[in-house]
Amino acid sequence: MAKKIKVDQELCIGCGACVNLCPDAFELQDDGKVNVVNKDESKKCDCEIAINSCPVGAIKIEK
Ligand code: SF4
């Protein structure tokens, strides 16, 4: 099912956990925060793992 993943830039501490788990969907930016770079990949990706691994709960699924 198609889902939209979003990273809350205010909460993200740039730990890189989500990037390691889903390198096609998440990318560390120059400002040290992570953003969703590939919405199609994030739809395919089992981002539950990335969501659960985020220490600050910055990854959200938009409904
Ligand atoms: S796991 Fe969470 S805090 Fe860590 S880089 Fe990803 S979004 Fe940011």
Image (cartoon, helix red, strand yellow):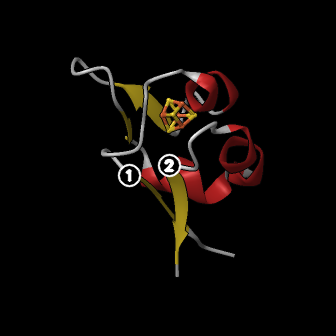
Q: Is residue 1 left or right of residue 8?
A: right
The quadrant of the picture occupied by the N terminus is: bottom right
Figure quadrant of residue 43: bottom right
Q: Is residue 60 left or right of residue 31?
A: right
Which residue is identified by label 1? 8
Badge 2 or badge 1: first in the primary sequence: 1
Crowdedness of circle 2 by 10 Å Cα count: few (<14), some, many (20+)?
some
Residue 59 location in percent, x, y? 53, 52
The CB of the residue at mark 1 lies under 8 Å from ligand 1: yes
Q: Secondary structure beneath disc 1?
A: loop
* On screen, residue 53 above or below 6: above
Q: Secondary structure beneath disc 2?
A: loop
Cα distance, mark 2 to mark 1? Answer: 5 Å
* On screen, residue 31 above or below 34: above
Which amino acid does the dot numbered 1 rest on? Asp
The CB of the residue at mark 2 lies under 8 Å from ligand 1: yes
Residue 9 location in percent, x, y? 31, 44
Q: Looking at the image, which residue is at 60% across and 73% down? A: 2
Q: Looking at the image, which residue is at 50% across and 55% down? A: 40
Q: Which mark is residue 58?
A: 2
User: What is the count of numbered marks?
Assistant: 2
Q: Is residue 51 left or right of residue 57?
A: right
Which amino acid does the dot numbered 2 rest on? Ala
Q: Nearer the viewer, residue 18 or 10?
A: 10
Q: Are marks 2 and 1 in contact (CB under 8 Å)?
A: yes
